Image (spheres, rainbow, N blue to C red):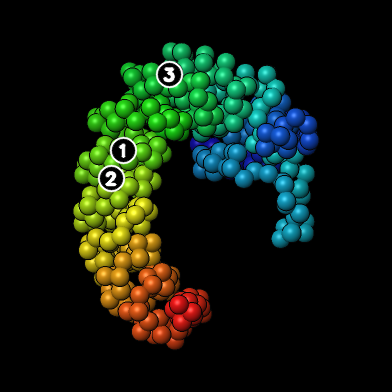
Amino acid sequence: MRSTTALVVAALTVTGGASALALAGGGGISFGSDWDHGSHHAGPDSARVEAFLGALHATAPMVCEMVTDQLGNFWSSEGDDGIGSLADASRNWEPARDSLSSPVNDAAARRRLARALGDEDPCVRRAAAKMLGRSGVLAAAALHEALRASAPRVREAALLALGHAELPDFYDEIVSATRDNDPAVVAMATWALGELERPAAIGRLGELVSSREVRVRRAAAWGIGQLEDPRGVALVEPLLRDGDVTTRVVAAEALGDIESATAAPALAAALKDTDLRVRCAAARALGELDDLERAPQELIDALGSGDLSLRHAAAEALGEIHDVRAVGALGKALDESDVETRRAVVHALAEIEDVSTVPYLLRAIKDSDPEIRKIAVEALGDRKDK
């Protein structure tokens, strides 16, 4: 078991408080060639990478995952003037943080990260993969080699890196990896294939939706959604009836990403799913479909559901569809006790430009919530101007 002491030391190391020479000693702010590529900071050297990976090893799994989640997301000091910071908070860790989120230009550092693709700790593997992925073509040679590794976890981590890198030259190798004999590798390759967003991938992804492995089916559905190709609707729809709940959720979300109105009947049927998460995902997806002029009756009926989250999702979706047939049900939903759902209801009424909404909007201007009153008043003003 990792001790509390180790966790504290690791946290200090990550922020630059401990092992200051290692973490704060390499890679400062640079306005050189990286500036044009969206990175304003030099990447980490090998000493900093070694210290960072060691910190991840030492800390608790939850902390490791939280830190790794943020790698490359919004780790940057740009525009941060310290407003809102505690008066005694030190900011001397910023150069280390910023360098760790930048492309790894140092060859020795990339070699260390490549070795970490085979680490026993999955969080460390994930961190190394993300850092290599953010390095793009600089990491290409190392990733080519990792894809040929005998250890499945190395191949899996290499594909995770490629998903983050989105390097088109690896397309054939990623497709080949979807036929790997290890299910985890196949699942990650399927995800990486979706990340490339290449239209030609729809054929292979369409085959993978029938995989016996649940993680592969999920990744295939998600990948097809990323392509936003209407041909994907027929491929994903069967997964709305999959035995795995999460797969059904991902399938509904993918159909929303595709945005084709042809998915409306299948999503409407999914509003009757036994699991609330699937029903909510289906409702949200219906609101994302292009050119859907008539809301399925199942979506309108969902406004009267006993589940608050579904009522909210249905109200938001109806606000995107603008179907006058939903006005009566939306009017009844003004009695909703949840203010966020009432806001979604009034917004939907405001978006439906029909005289039948006026009595409900007049009622809404008396609501206790100022945001609801504002939406209603503005909508009534628009009606008057027209």
- Residue closest to the eye, 266 or 56: 266
SS for tag 2? helix
Give the quadrant of residue 271.
bottom left
SS for tag 1? helix
Q: Earlier in the sequence, mark 1 or mark 3?
A: 3
Q: Amino acid at mark 2?
A: Arg
Q: Earlier in the sequence, mark 2 or mark 1?
A: 1
Choose mark 2 or mark 3, whichever is in front.
Answer: 3
Q: Are marks 2 and 3 in contact (CB under 8 Å)?
A: no
Give the quadrant of residue 241.
top left
Residue identifier under label 2: 248
- Between marks 2 and 3, how big is the CA–CA gap? 29 Å
Choose mark 2 or mark 1, whichever is in front.
Answer: 1
Residue identifier under label 3: 172
Q: Are marks 1 and 3 in contact (CB under 8 Å)?
A: no
Residue name at image x 27 percent, y 76 percent: 328
> Is 81 placed left or right of 179 in the picture?
right
- Residue 91 appears at what percent x and percent y? 76, 48
- Residue closest to the eye, 323 or 141: 323
Residue name at image x 30 percent, y 60 percent: 293
Q: Quadrant of the C terminus?
A: bottom left
Give the quadrant of residue 87.
bottom right
Q: Which mark is residue 298?
A: none
- Residue 172 appears at what percent x and percent y? 43, 18
Q: Label 3: few (<14), some or many (≥20) within 10 Å?
A: few
- Between marks 1 and 3, how big is the CA–CA gap? 21 Å
Q: Amino acid at mark 3?
A: Asp
Q: Amino acid at mark 1?
A: Gly
In this view, 205 is above or below 257: above
